[in-house]
Image: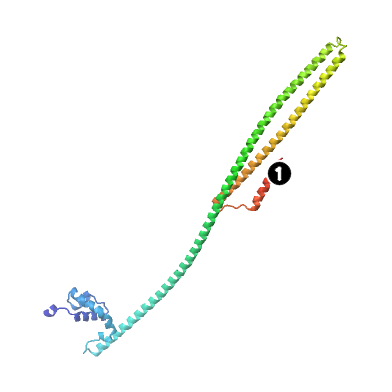
Amino acid sequence: METLRSRGITRDDVWQAADSLLKAGQRPTIERIRLHLGRGSPNTVSPHLDAWFAALGGRIQDPAAFAPAPGCPEPVTEAARYLWEAALQSARSSAEAALTQREAALAEASAVLQRERDALAQERQLMEARLEGAETAMAELARARDQATERATRAETAAAAWQQQAEALRAELASALAARHAMQDDFDARRAAWDQERETLTQRSAANERRMALELDAARVAARESQKMLESERRAAIDRLARAAEAASRQGSEMTRLGQAIAVLEERVRQRESLLAEYREQAGTAAADAAASGAAPRRTRPARMALSSAKGRRLRRAP
């Protein structure tokens, strides 16, 4: 007995132990084979077990591979054959069920993958369409921005021109007002001189009348000549007064005409300033609309014609 235990484990020992474990429904391992044999080291059992696993596929295909040894009783042989066929049938059923499940899972995964591919294709088309729309919108916004910039530049240029015209009109108005003040001062000075001359003439006439009254009794002989001289002086004074009144009338007419010209200039200045304010308001509104929406408002042709007509009516109404 001691000699049998010391004998080394052979390939047939390992294979028979593995077959016994497999027939018992257990998976052959190194530890189970050692327990089944009651001896053997892992280093000795491991190569024979690997060889058994390598040959297991071919042996399963050969029904006689697991047949009992010759001389076994018929009931044992029938039982072994029954167990083998049952094991094969169970293995086939399990394999077919697993294959069916795997095919169903594969079909479902293929369907899911196809749906995902279709969804990705649709999403890609949608993204491409959105990208094209975004590019078109960006191009439109760039064009609108350039147009708004150009209109703003033209508006600034026009505003600068209107500002220069307004400054020129203000300067002209200031010059006209200065001329008016100068003419008013000159008229006041001349009127004072005319009043002084009239007062002098009046005083002189009164003095002459008093002198003539005092000398009436002493100069009855020269009364007629003196009367003539007085009348002559009176007519000369009246002529001078008439000329002075005519000059004053002409001066008043000139002052009236100058006042009308100044009123016209003031009306033109107010019109230019009103047009300048409207133009600035329109330019500011266009710039604000372009910054808020990304597209500058386009002034239609009727609006430009209406603005030009309004300017023409204002200029025609000016006297």
Residue nearer the viewer, 285 or 163: 163
- Determine which quarter of the picture holds residue 16: bottom left
Residue lying furthest top in this view?
218
Find numbered disc 1 in the image and state the secondary structure of the residue it sits on. Answer: helix
In this view, 22 is above or below 143: below
Residue type, mark 1 in image: Arg
Q: Position of residue 125 (x, y in %)?
A: 49, 66
Specify whether residue 184 is in view.
Answer: yes
Residue ID at (28%, 83%): 60
Q: Position of residue 148 (x, y in %)?
A: 56, 51
Q: Is residue 318 left or right of residue 100?
A: right
In this view, 26 is above or below 284: below
In this view, 32 is above or below 173: below
Q: Is residue 30 left or right of residue 147?
A: left
Residue ID at (19%, 78%): 37
Q: Which residue is mark 1?
A: 316
